Image (cartoon, rainbow, N blue to C red):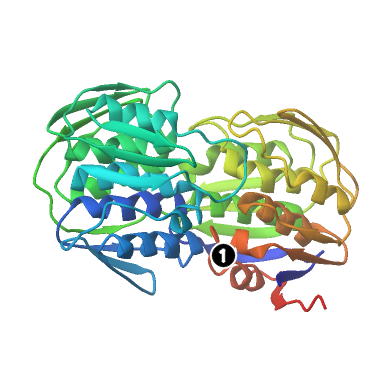
């Protein structure tokens, strides 16, 4: 069993550059299906979710190769339209392939996605969007979906600003004949990044980053070259680690404007935070204060993915911080493990009350999901003594070179294979 061994209590110092955004590269890889020809995509991190996406592309008949942080996809010889269950179950965002496969081939067969268990993630909005474009959808017992039909542009109104449904609607609409107007779209920066890639392929898309996106579909597409944006959640994780452990770090590679909801919380908690020159500097030299109330919300609100690591940092804040999770109902699975380290956190439904304690102590804990695993690592870096974190395969889904980056900042983190027998 793989584990992280963390020796806590060491300040983090220096610069760190984040890799490309997981939540951007995955829909971009799906979008490459739409264009016959070769797409070259830079700043792609070495993540297990990326490996799963490449496996799906190869299963569909694409050539998909990764060399360093560059991925080359040639979808000219696309032959398949079905994604097997075992590949769908490897990651929660696998449903993003639906719109692209359906748009390119006129049919798609897949099952409900897997990945982290954060509570129900219904794909009703995805299906409503492609139905609005003329697709027929048949759902069978066991969660298998069969979609087919010639897509035509139309009006899509999302009941809520879902990131995945927005991306799937964009991908399907690019292949649909005519104009599609997508209302109540999610506004996350990764959606604007997807728009940038689609434009590189020759698609006519505008409005990403606002609540209304317009797609002039049915245009001829071609391969292209694109560089993925930096990962704002990785940046938030490193800022959380420095806040917890103390020290001074400068995070580059992500747009500081995308981090403002999180840096505002750390400023309220007593950290010195400065943005400029393409990076964010955080200095934490004294015990943190509480931060009042933190409500997760769609962008530009506080990101749900940043909630667990920020909570871990504020577990040692003087006073009480209230977290209210509005996105996922099961996003507090890390709380019971933080309690093993001495945290004082009470959960009632979607509300978590964090009463700061003077110190956390090292413990044996287990990550249950990706961002919860990041929370445990943040807590361990600021704790007294040694922690053993298992379940690190969850972290591999969204963080590349994690231990190397933290060690370069002065942390002591190593990956080991534990023998439990």
Callout 1: SS: strand
State which quadrant residue 192 falls in: top left
Q: Please tell me whether residue 108 is drawn above or below residue 16 in the rendered image.
A: above
Q: Residue farthest to the front?
A: 141
Seen as rendered, the residue at the extreme left is 220
So how many labels did they put on this image?
Answer: 1
Residue in the image at 17% along x and 51% along y: 201
Residue 174 position, x and y percent, is 20, 39
Residue at image x 51%, y 31%?
Answer: 298
- Quadrant where the C terminus is found in the figure: bottom right
Q: Residue placed at 24% from the left, 43% from the top?
A: 107
Q: Is residue 400 left or right of residue 195?
A: right
As drawn, 315 above or below 43:
above
User: Could you say which quadrant of the image residue 188 lies in?
Assistant: top left
Q: Is residue 320 left or right of residue 170?
A: right
Choose top left, top right, bottom left or bottom right for residue 383.
bottom right
Position in image of residue 195 (x %, y %): 27, 42
Q: Would you say 273 lies left or right of 102 here?
A: right
Which residue is more in the foreground, 402 or 180?
180
Of residues 380 and 36, the one drawn nearer to the viewer in this rendering: 36
Residue in the picture at 76% in, 58% down? 366
Horizontal and vertical percent for residue 219? 10, 41
Q: Depth check: give the residue in front, 297 or 391.
A: 391
Identify residue for label 1: 15
In the rendered structure, the answer to whether residue 315 lies left or right of residue 140 reads right
- Compared with 167, 342 (above or below) is below
Let me know if residue 255 appears in the view.
Answer: no
């Amino acid at each position: 069993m793989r584990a992280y061994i963390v020796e806590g209590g060491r300040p983090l110092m220096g610069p760190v550059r984040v890799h490309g955004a997981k939540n951007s590269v995955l829909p971009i890889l799906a979008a490459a299906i739409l264009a016959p020809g070769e797409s070259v995509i830079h700043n792609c991190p070495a993540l297990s979710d990326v490996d799963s996406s490449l496996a799906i592309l190869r299963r569909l008949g694409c050539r998909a190769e990764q060399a360093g942080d560059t991925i080359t996809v040639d979808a000219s010889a696309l032959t398949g339209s079905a994604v097997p269950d075992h590949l769908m179950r490897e990651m929660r965002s696998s449903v993003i392939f639906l719109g692209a496969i359906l748009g390119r081939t006129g049919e798609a067969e897949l099952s409900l996605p897997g990945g982290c268990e954060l509570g129900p993630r219904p794909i009703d909005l995805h299906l409503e969007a492609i139905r609005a474009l003329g697709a027929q959808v048949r759902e069978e017992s066991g969660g298998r979906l069969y979609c087919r039909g010639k897509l035509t542009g139309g009006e899509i109104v999302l009941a809520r600003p879902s990131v995945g449904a927005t991306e799937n609607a964009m991908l399907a609409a690019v292949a649909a004949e005519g104009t599609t107007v997508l209302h109540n779209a999610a506004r996350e920066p990764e959606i604007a990044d997807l728009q940038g890639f689609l434009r590189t392929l020759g698609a006519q898309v505008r409005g990403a980053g606002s609540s209304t996106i317009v797609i002039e579909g049915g245009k001829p597409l071609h391969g292209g070259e694109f560089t993925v944006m930096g990962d704002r959640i990785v940046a938030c994780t490193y800022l959380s680690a420095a806040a917890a452990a103390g020290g001074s770090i400068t995070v580059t590679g992500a747009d500081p404007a995308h981090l403002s909801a999180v840096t505002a919380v750390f400023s309220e908690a007593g950290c010195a935070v400065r943005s400029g020159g393409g990076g964010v500097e955080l200095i934490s030299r004294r015990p943190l204060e509480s931060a009042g109330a933190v409500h997760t919300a769609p962008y530009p609100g506080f990101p749900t993915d940043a909630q667990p690591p920020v909570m871990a940092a504020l577990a040692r804040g003087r006073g009480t911080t209230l977290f209210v999770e509005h996105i996922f109902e099961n996003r507090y699975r890390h709380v019971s493990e933080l309690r093993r380290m001495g945290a004082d956190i009470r959960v009632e439904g979607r509300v978590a009350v964090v009463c700061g304690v003077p110190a956390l102590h090292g413990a044996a804990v287990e990550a249950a999901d990706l961002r919860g695993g990041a929370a445990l690592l943040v807590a361990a870096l600021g704790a007294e003594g040694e922690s053993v974190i298992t379940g690190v395969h969850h972290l591999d889904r969204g963080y590349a070179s994690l231990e190397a980056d933290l060690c370069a900042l002065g942390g002591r983190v190593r990956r080991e294979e534990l023998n439990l027998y």
